[in-house]
Image (tube, helix red, strand yellow):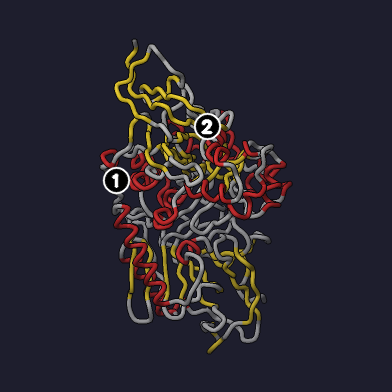
Amino acid sequence: MQTIDLLIKNGKVLNVFTKKFEKKNLWINDGKIVSTENESEFKATKIIGASNQYLVPGFIDSHVHIESSLITPSELGKVIVPMGVTSVVTDPHEIANVAGIDGIKYMINDAKQSPLDVFVMLPSSVPATSFEHNGATLNASSLNSLYNEPSVIGLAEVMDFPAVHNRDHDMMKKINDALEKGYQVDGHGAGLSAKQLGEYKEVGISTDHESTDLNQMYDRLDVGMNIFLREGTVERDLQNTIQAVNEDNIDKFSFCTDDKFITTIINEGSINFNIQLAIEYGIKPEDAYVMASLNAAKAHKINNLGALAPGYKADILMISDPKKVDVKQVIKNGKVMTENNFKTTPLKFTKNTVHQNIKLEDLALPLKSNQECHVIGIQPNHIETDHLKIKVPVEDGAFKSDLENDILKMVDVERHHNLGTFGLGLVHGFNIKHGAIATTVAHDSHNIVAVGTSDESIYKAIQEITKVGGGIAVVDDEKVLATMPLPVAGLMSNKSWQNASEDLNAITQAFKQISGEINFNPFITLSFLTLPVIPTIKLTDQGLYDFNQQKFIDIQPK
């Protein structure tokens, strides 16, 4: 008789291939499932009774930027593994845009401390566009050696469509390097037409997570892409796209969070929240769990995850009510997870990444009176923007904040090489009444971005986050109200997830002191107003960028 590590007995096991719950036993040895039958020749060292419990595979986040949680990979594992998320597929292009290869290696090494499987897609677009002033440039040859890392499984979201369209040599080498190794390539098709998505598919890009409505979803299905249904802190897309899922195409869908603050994860969950929403919108529980496991694994060509069957990794969740996604116990690699599995601290990151020399007088924005200006319009809970054209107040030849109509000044300041470049713009939607906010989290170049009611408050907020080596600050007209230091590349806290979430709650409460009511997260929304690969107009350190025209534009048309 063979002695094996663990038997989970008499559970209602989800067969992801038939999409049905079946009464089975799970025999586990060396972290893998070895049988689901009543084995007479096996003897288990440990037995867990699972009567009246439902067993499903561990959840997989198909696409996430861990940096957006504002905590390190090892800290994130402490939060999401108990929620049932046993694997994530991450794109570390946020830290790569700041610290290059060293940043990617930091994420890989910190993640090794955690039971959470952190699969890495190598950043394809560092910088996101050729004109960006970010902290590093990664070409195909610099990425190639990282494929030796066991956790690396492909090339991350390709967001530079012009490079694909023009068959840019280096971009095509990045794509082909991944494909030749048998890996897959993620897409980023924001704002792309069906024809353009076809160009992505033609070169081997097989996934996308940027659908915000049903028409975009159908375009992706038409070209045969695997689709990640997204629900982040600001990217609330699942409810607008889940209706595209049906029995004929469900194998094409899985879930992702993309960008989600630690406080949002604590308050509502991670992939378990996506599953709950999907069930609420009519997806069968069995189907939702398959989307969260097997479909995600198949999309990323991970062959040993996503099923409770012989040969698969023993990542198992015990749930009492499938409709509620109430995870009662997590088994990772055949081991029952307890607090003792998470005795880690974030690795040290010692490099200072904030270097700027902007002056108060630089923030003045000269304008002509009685002439329309291009204004960035916030779309609450979306990362796309409205392109507004509005006449704004001008006093002594310069912009004056329009509190009545909620039009404020915004600035993007280069912080990596002390170039002295900065861009000024106008934005509608923050509802700030007095004061400013600033952050070094500014996708994807991660320069400094700030918005406020006066030049003095904007300057004060910028100086505060510079002083702490990166972070998020809220100031009123007189003083700093709250700061969240993010010393890990200006993107992540070096604190425990509990202390980091306290910092984040503090700046959230401080924002409420300087603003009227809004129905979106102001900090992550601000961080996306600098991303020029997302429609429609965004602000970079070189000025206002029009996505549709693919060029910089003046705030006031000449």
Q: Position of residue 170 (x, y in %)?
A: 57, 41
Residue 263 or 66: which is nearer the viewer? 263
Can residue 136 be seen from the camera position used here? no
Kindly identify the residue that appears in the image at 54 percent across and 62 percent down: 381
Identify residue for label 1. Answer: 347
Q: Secondary structure at mark 1?
A: loop
Q: Position of residue 132 (x, y in %)?
A: 53, 57
Above or below — where is 42 with respect to 136? above
Q: Where the C terminus falls, by quadrant? A: bottom right
Kindly identify the residue that appears in the image at 34 percent across and 81 percent down: 478
Residue 495, located in which quarter of the rendered image? bottom left
- Locate residue 488 relative to residue 248 in the image: left or right: left
Inter-mark Cα distance, 1 to 2: 42 Å
Kindly identify the residue that appears in the image at 33 percent across and 39 percent down: 114
Badge 2 local density, few (<14 within 10 Å), some, or many (20+)? some
Inspect the image, locate mark 2, and give the three-letter code of the amino acid beneath it: Phe
Can residue 298 be seen from the camera position used here? yes
Numbered disc in front, either 1 or 2: 2
- Locate residue 339 relative to residue 353 in the image: left or right: left
Q: Farthest residue toward the right?
A: 195
Q: Position of residue 516 (x, y in %)?
A: 47, 77
Residue 88 or 549: which is nearer the viewer? 88
Badge 1 local density, few (<14 within 10 Å), some, or many (20+)? some
Inspect the image, locate mark 1, and give the three-letter code of the amino acid beneath it: Leu
Residue 90 or 105: which is nearer the viewer? 90
Q: Looking at the image, how many numbered discs can be counted on the residues?
A: 2
Residue 21, numbered circle: 2
